Image (cartoon, grey):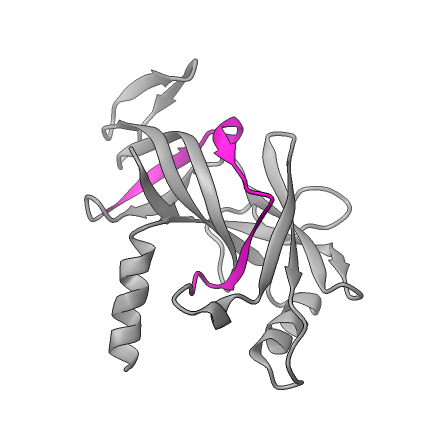
């Protein structure tokens, strides 16, 4: 059963790209079980390209992001059952070139509900990383060691292929144990802590 579930999860992850960000810890509101987080920046991050089965570097052009009014909040991109939805993410806005959003964890059915366990770990500061699952709408791939102008800026690829994603659409936000982008954390009130139609997780 675990193997079947793992295979299903892998197949689903091929539909979206993952990029990790972070929660602002001092933005946590115990009353409505919510938190503010940096959900996307233009910082380069390593992502897995399922189409070519390789790890590449990717830059998300912030102004090319598309956010619905609300997307599901998931545990670590688990999205093969409606019970995997642990809340929602809303109130997305651009701030200093970064996308900020507010996550809200649903009320638990009982004290032993996984939703409550997850929320307590967020509220206590043990879970700080968030990640987005997004669809690629338009991008340019730069071969390793090459450089190219994209959207008026020159980008240079390092040892790996560099993907400049100029247009992308977010489908979900996840709480994750480890983040890939140091700028993406649950947010503190003091400020932000020191991404052809295919989708990824980041």
Picture quarter with the N terminus: bottom left
Relative to 54, say whether 3 is above or below: below
Q: Is residue 149 visible?
A: yes
Picture quarter containing residue 162? top left
Q: In the visual, does 109 lie left or right of 154? A: right
Question: Seen from this angle, which residue lies furthest right?
Answer: 31
Relative image position of residue 45 (x, y in whole percent): 41, 42
Q: Residue at x 47, y 68 (%)?
A: 82
Relative to 59, say whether 20 is above or below: below
Relative image position of residue 150 (x, y in whole percent): 37, 18
Prevailing SS of the magenta stretch: strand
Q: In the visual, does 200 lie left or right of 186? A: left
Residue stretch in magenta: 54-78
Q: Is residue 176 visible?
A: no
Relative image position of residue 74 (x, y in whole percent): 51, 62
Picture quarter containing residue 165? top left
């Amino acid at each position: 059963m675990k193997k079947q579930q793992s295979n299903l999860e892998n197949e689903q992850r091929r539909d979206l790209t993952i990029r990790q960000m972070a929660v602002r810890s001092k933005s946590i509101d115990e009353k409505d079980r919510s938190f503010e987080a940096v959900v996307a920046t233009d910082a380069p991050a390593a992502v897995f390209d399922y189409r070519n089965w390789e790890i590449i570097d990717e830059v998300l052009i912030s102004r090319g992001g598309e956010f619905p009014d609300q997307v599901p909040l998931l545990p670590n991109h688990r999205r093969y059952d409606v019970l995997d939805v642990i809340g929602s993410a809303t109130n997305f806005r651009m701030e200093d070139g970064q996308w900020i959003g507010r996550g809200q964890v649903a009320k638990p059915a009982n004290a032993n509900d996984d939703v409550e366990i997850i929320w307590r770990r967020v509220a206590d500061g043990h879970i700080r990383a968030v990640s987005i699952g997004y669809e690629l709408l338009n991008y340019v791939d730069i071969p390793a060691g090459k450089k190219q102008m994209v959207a008026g800026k020159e980008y240079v690829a390092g040892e790996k292929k560099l993907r400049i994603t100029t247009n992308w659409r977010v489908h979900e936000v996840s709480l994750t144990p480890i983040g890939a982008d140091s700028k993406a954390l649950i947010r503190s009130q003091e400020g932000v802590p020191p991404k052809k139609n295919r989708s990824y997780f980041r």
